[in-house]
Amino acid sequence: MAASTRVEAARSALRQQTIELPSWAFGNSGTRFKVFSQPGVPRDPFEKLSDAAQVHKYTGVAPRVSLHIPWDLVDDFGALARHADDLGVRIGMINSNVFQDEDFMLGSLAHPDPRVRAKAVDHHKQCIDVMRATGSKDLKVWLSDGLNYPGQDSIRARQDRIAESLAEIYAALDDDQHMVLEYKFFEPAFYVTDVPDWGTSLLHVMALGDRAKVVLDTGHHAPGTNIEFIVAQLLRQGRLGAFDFNSRFYADDDLMVGAADPFQLFRIMHEIVSAGAHAPDSGVNFMLDQCHNIEPKIPAQIRSVMNVQEATAKALLVDVQALEAAQLAGDVLGAHGVLMDAYDTDVRPLVAQVREEMGLDPNPTAAFAASGYAEKIASERVGGAQAGWGA
């Protein structure tokens, strides 16, 4: 494929790409040491959606917003969905939360007490009700379940309990609804994490059915893990349901995607593009899962969306024919060079041109800064409790 043809194909694909935003990214968040507050932070889910809509307004590719229950509980989810629609966005994935209730100290779906397990299952059924009320089609499950000490509980029994609980939740889904199961290498459990890796998540979702898949958080791996290999394997099985894009240096830092290792993000997107999983109908949902502690929330989300766009653009510019020819010929350096040529390409002019074609300002960060929205919400959102962890 000629270079000009690859560029045109990339432009078309970038216009169709969508990236889901997390509602919690717009609230105050930080570390276990300190959460720094900022002026204008949303005080309720309605204001979170208003801020998320700004990201979509200036990037054109962020039309969905994930909710977190109970952080985003409201009395009328129909009204919240209508508010989203009025803003030009819609509700995306519904995230459950079974890690902040006193009853879940020893686990949720893996808890040895049937009463606590039933409570955790019921919470997920509540999330499914929220999905019905908002038009969401996807439930995301992450479990903090695990053990701190050897002998604290039966490792095998906990896996059985999780499997039984997930089966009950899956059975409660409507026929057009889906579930994705997240995994995390460590934290908060110290000895055993009950769903620590992609293999454990994959085993559980394969036992459930075709509408259950794995969600991959790019920060949830041991140092040195080849994440793009995991992506490739899950795509082979048709079980990659979603990404939680972020970036980390040491652990699950939830920094802005592409901030720590933009080359890794490119390598991941290369696997995605190679499998055609970047297409809107692929069934793979591209999401951000980030917490902005010292940087302003809306500009940070805009920049994160831009980082994903640029990594995708570079992956789309890979000369696939030249790469395959080099691979089949055993030309190690030639094949590597093809990838590096794409990665070293400055795609910012290309992505800016795509924005202009979509009727947007080519520089989203500057356009948002000039809009005065940040100053407006800082002056208007006075009083009340700012959203943050647990709200």
Image: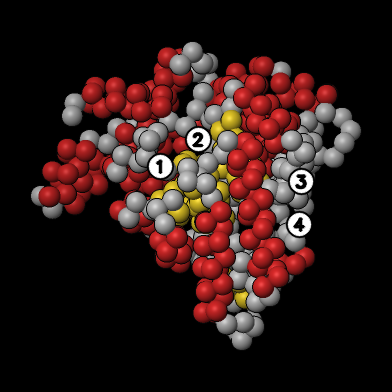
Kindly identify the amino acid type of the residue bearing the numbered disc 1: Gly
Comparing 264 with 196, the one in front is 196
Q: CA distance from mark 2 to mark 3?
A: 23 Å
With 34 as the anchor, is 276 left or right in this view? Answer: left
Q: Which mark is residue 391?
A: 3
Q: CA distance from mark 4 to mark 1?
A: 38 Å
Q: Nearer the viewer, mark 2 or mark 1?
A: 1
Tell me, for residue 283, which label it has, or none. Answer: 1
Distance from disc 2 to disc 4, alpha carbons, whole Å, reads 30 Å
What SS does tag 2 mark? loop
Residue 332 appearing in the image: yes
Indicate the quadrant containing the N terminus: top left, top right, bottom left or bottom right. top left
Please determine whether, in this image, residue 57 is positioned above or below residue 228. above
Q: Nearer the viewer, residue 353 or 380?
A: 380
Residue carrying label 4: 33
* SS under mark 4: loop
